[in-house]
């Protein structure tokens, strides 16, 4: 599977160079790539990623309410499993469902953010988030697609539509609840004072980290359903504490912050080309903030960080606007994609994991 992703990544990079000469015919390979990726994720071998065996167990034992069997999945997964089990006990049925909607929502969102240079965003998506959300965290895959569409509606001032998208996303993964306050964000070009405020979330998150403040540790476990999920995350943190922890100074985190600073510096240049840039940058700020802030619960910290930061498939593609001629800008984006591949591909190699997530 890794070789297939590498091949499609290379094809997508080539198409991004040729896109300006392709006209409307570019939508043919765009759709074909989408279909190929759906089938690749939906028909993958069980066990090739760290979560598929858990999902297979949950799918075949959907009638049990015990979290030790279902892994604490949302009721939507249980209902879908019950439906598909009428036809087959092959877990690939539900894999295809999640792959189809998770990828389709993202591919549609990409075309809404830009009619040009769509392949740059697809390439960046392939580098990291395809492996993470469509192959591994399949429930989050649909949520992240709804999240991207919600930010579009927020940018266009249609907050009720944004709320609807986020509500749909919450049906597939309860962590979407944390996204609901985003409907109050503004997409206006931010003043320098406002930009600094949002950027200051990053050092503030690190201050909380160094202060040893595990914010979620003080939440009541009696909160219906949410408390149960938090308890699962806490148990997971305790189990893996000796093996895995959040590295808030990891090369990937530092690389992400460096790119954030670059985007911050060229805020006005990019905002002229991408009307949704202001709201995307705010979401990006929150994403980076989440990792150190919630580091006491490693699984939750990484999940929230990755969820908010899916906006980078759009933002990093916008970097090419800052360099002339544009060809060299695209080469820089290619380089970013190749670096991200080093972190995305291990998600589909089960031997690289010290532990398996149960959520």
Image (cartoon, rainbow, N blue to C red):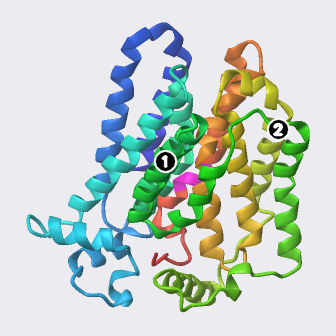
Q: Secondary structure at mark 2?
A: helix
The image quarter containing residue 81 is bottom left
Q: Crowding at label 1, few (<14), some or many (≥20) Cα neighbours within 10 Å?
A: few
Instruction: Assess whether mark 2 and mark 1 are in contact (beta carbons under 8 angstroms).
Output: no
What element does badge 1 sit on? Answer: helix
Q: Which-is-in-front pick, marks 1 and 2?
A: 1
Residue position for label 2: 264
Q: From which residue to which does the magenta span run? A: 341-345
x then y, percent, for residue 149: 49, 42
- Disc ID at residue 219: none
Residue 183 lies left or right of residue 203; in this view the side is: left
Q: Compared to 5, does 354 lie above or below?
A: below
User: In x, y percent, where is residue 214?
Assistant: 75, 81
Residue visible at 80% across and 32% down? 267
**Residue drawn at (36%, 24%) of the image:** 29
Please state the horizontal and vertical placement of residue 332, each as a whole percent of the image. Answer: 71, 29
Magenta stretch: includes residue 218: no
Q: Which mark sits nearer the N-terminus, 1 or 2?
A: 1
Q: Main secondary structure of the magenta part?
A: helix
Residue furthest toward the left?
87
Location of residue 222 with respect to 214 vertically, above or below:
below
* Few, some or many residues within 10 Å of mark 2 (<14, 14–19, 20+): some
Report whether residue 188 is seen.
yes
Front residue of 242 and 22? 22
- The part of the image, by quadrant, that contains residue 46 is bottom left
The spot of residue 237 in percent (x, y) is 62, 84
Q: Residue at x 41, y 17 (%)?
A: 26
Task: For residue 130, say whether it is visible.
Answer: no
Against 107, is 144 above or below? below
Residue 343 part of the magenta-drawn span: yes
Task: Check disc 1 and report the residue beneath it.
Answer: 160
Separation of residues labelled 1 and 2 (CA atoms) = 29 Å
């Amino acid at each position: 599977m890794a070789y297939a992703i590498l091949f499609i990544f290379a094809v997508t990079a080539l198409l991004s160079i040729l896109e300006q000469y392709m006209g409307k015919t570019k939508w043919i390979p765009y759709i074909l790539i989408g279909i190929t990726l759906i089938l690749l994720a939906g028909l993958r071998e069980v066990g090739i990623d760290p979560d598929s065996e858990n999902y297979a167990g949950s799918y075949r034992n959907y009638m049990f309410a015990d979290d030790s069997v279902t892994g604490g999945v949302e009721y939507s997964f249980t209902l879908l499993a019950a439906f598909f089990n009428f036809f087959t006990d092959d877990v690939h049925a539900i894999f295809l469902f999640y792959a189809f909607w998770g990828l389709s929502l993202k591919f549609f969102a990409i075309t809404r953010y830009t009619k040009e240079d769509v392949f740059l965003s697809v390439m960046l998506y392939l580098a990291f988030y395809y492996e993470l959300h469509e192959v591994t965290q399949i429930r989050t895959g649909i949520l992240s697609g709804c999240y991207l569409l919600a930010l579009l509606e927020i940018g266009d001032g249609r907050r009720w539509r944004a709320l609807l998208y986020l509500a749909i996303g919450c049906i597939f993964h309860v962590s979407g609840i944390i996204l609901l306050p985003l409907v109050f964000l503004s997409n206006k070009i931010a003043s320098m004072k406002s930009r600094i405020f949002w950027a200051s979330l990053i050092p503030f998150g690190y201050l909380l980290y160094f202060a040893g403040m595990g914010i979620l540790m003080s939440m009541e476990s009696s909160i219906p359903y949410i408390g149960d999920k938090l308890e699962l995350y806490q148990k997971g943190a305790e189990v893996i504490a000796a093996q895995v922890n959040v590295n808030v100074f990891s090369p990937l985190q530092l690389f992400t912050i460096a790119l954030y600073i670059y985007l911050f510096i060229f805020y006005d240049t990019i905002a002229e080309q991408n009307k949704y840039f202001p709201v995307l940058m705010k979401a990006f700020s929150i994403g980076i903030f989440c990792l150190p802030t919630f580091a006491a619960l490693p699984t939750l910290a990484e999940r929230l960080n990755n969820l908010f930061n899916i906006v980078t498939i759009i933002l990093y593609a916008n970097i090419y606007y800052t360099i002339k001629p544009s060809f060299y800008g695209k080469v820089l984006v290619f380089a970013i994609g190749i670096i991200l591949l080093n972190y995305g591909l291990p998600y589909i190699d089960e031997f690289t994991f010290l532990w398996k997530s149960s959520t």
